Image (spheres, rainbow, N blue to C red):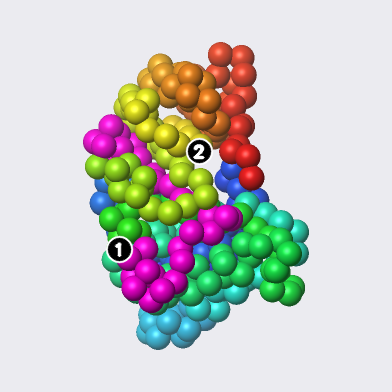
């Protein structure tokens, strides 16, 4: 996976304040991965020195499928003084099979160090961490690993979610998600590719967005509208990140005359 300028990259993701990428790189496992945005933009962030830091002889040969662990980024959130909502691994999946549990444990150590407003380690301050994964089966195995080490994985500042695109994704992943300890449980429907029924599941937040890029797949606006209506009926905050209108992807669009930028309560 390509390195990023500095330690991370500034974010244009509307539902978070910052991204934190202790892991970069991924492999495709779901239908929604076909036109992966992270793979598409990764080449913009090649940096001299990445090959030396990770013992890669020729960084021109690096591929998005190369999963890299960035030990130098592990404590970065401790130096952000203003409380922030932090998206963990926007350029990869923390629970990828190539990320060892002892490294994920270090990521969780940082999350824990930022979990108590009164006890945060100087100079860090209280932050909320948002993790999305397409691999909840690995996330629950990590939970079991932590329990075996007599460690807790439930923190009041951790929002954990799955990234789905189809009903098949949801049906396979959400039963696992609901077994994993987290302050908030999230479903991110991005890219939304079909109608999805969430009505039988208790969630804290739903994010939705169409696919972007030149090869994006079309989604009927009624699929998004139906998801919005389910959230309203269930009292679940709904965040509509982007939607295709008249052939153009619009960020924070109006749906039926309203912009949906709702968050769960902290």
2 up-or-down from 87: above or below? below
Query: Is residue 170 highlighted in magenta?
Result: yes
Mark 2 and 1 residues: CB-CB less than 8 Å, in contact? no
Q: Earlier in the sequence, mark 2 or mark 1?
A: 1
**Picture residue at 54% right of the left edge, 59% below the top:** 155
Q: Residue furthest top?
A: 256
**Picture residue at 58% right of the left edge, 55% below the top:** 157
Residue indicated by mark 1: 141
Q: Is residue 78 visible?
A: yes
184 up-or-down from 81: above or below? above
Q: Position of residue 89 (x, y in %)?
A: 48, 59
Label 1's element?
helix
Say left or right for 114 vs 175.
right
- Magenta span: 142-171
167 up-or-down from 102: above or below? above
Mark identifier at residue 204: 2
Q: Position of residue 140 (x, y in %)?
A: 33, 58
Q: Is residue 224 visible?
A: no
- Quadrant position of residue 87: bottom right
**Picture residue at 34% right of the left edge, 37% below the top:** 165
Label 2's element?
loop
178 up-or-down from 95: above or below? above
**Picture residue at 61% right of the left edge, 32% below the top:** 261
Other-residue count near label 1 (Cα within 10 Å), few / some / many at <14 / 14–19 / ≥20: some
Alpha-carbon span between mark 2 and mark 1? 22 Å
Question: In the picture, which quadrant includes the N terminus?
Answer: bottom left
Say left or right for 133 vs 141.
right
Q: How many marks?
A: 2
Q: Position of residue 65 (x, y in %)?
A: 32, 64
Say left or right for 95 vs 186.
left
Mark identifier at residue 200: none
Near-viewer residue (69 or 233): 233
């Amino acid at each position: 996976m390509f390195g990023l300028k500095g330690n991370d990259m500034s974010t244009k993701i509307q539902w978070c304040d910052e991204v934190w990428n202790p892991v970069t790189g991924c492999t495709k496992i779901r239908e929604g991965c076909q036109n992966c945005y992270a793979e598409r933009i990764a080449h913009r962030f090649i940096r001299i020195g990445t090959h030396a830091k990770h013992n890669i002889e020729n960084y021109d040969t690096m591929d998005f499928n190369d999963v890299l662990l960035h030990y130098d980024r592990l404590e970065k959130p401790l130096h952000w003084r203003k409380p922030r909502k932090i998206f963990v691994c926007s350029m990869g999946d923390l629970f990828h099979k190539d990320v060892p549990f002892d490294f994920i444990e270090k990521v969780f150590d940082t999350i824990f160090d930022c979990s108590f407003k009164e006890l945060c380690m100087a100079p860090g301050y209280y932050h909320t961490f948002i993790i999305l994964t397409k691999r909840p089966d690995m996330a629950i195995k990590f939970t079991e690993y932590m329990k075996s080490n007599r460690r807790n994985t439930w923190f009041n500042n951790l929002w954990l979610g799955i990234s789905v695109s189809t009903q098949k994704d949801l049906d396979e992943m959400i039963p696992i998600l609901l077994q994993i300890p987290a302050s908030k449980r999230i479903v991110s429907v991005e890219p939304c590719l079909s109608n999805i029924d969430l009505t039988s599941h208790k969630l804290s937040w739903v994010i939705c967005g169409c696919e972007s890029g030149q090869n994006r797949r079309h989604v009927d606006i009624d699929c998004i509208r139906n998801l919005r209506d389910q959230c309203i009926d269930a009292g679940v905050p709904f965040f509509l990140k982007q939607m295709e209108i008249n052939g153009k992807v619009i960020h924070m669009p109006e749906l039926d005359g309203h912009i949906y930028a709702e968050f769960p309560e902290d």
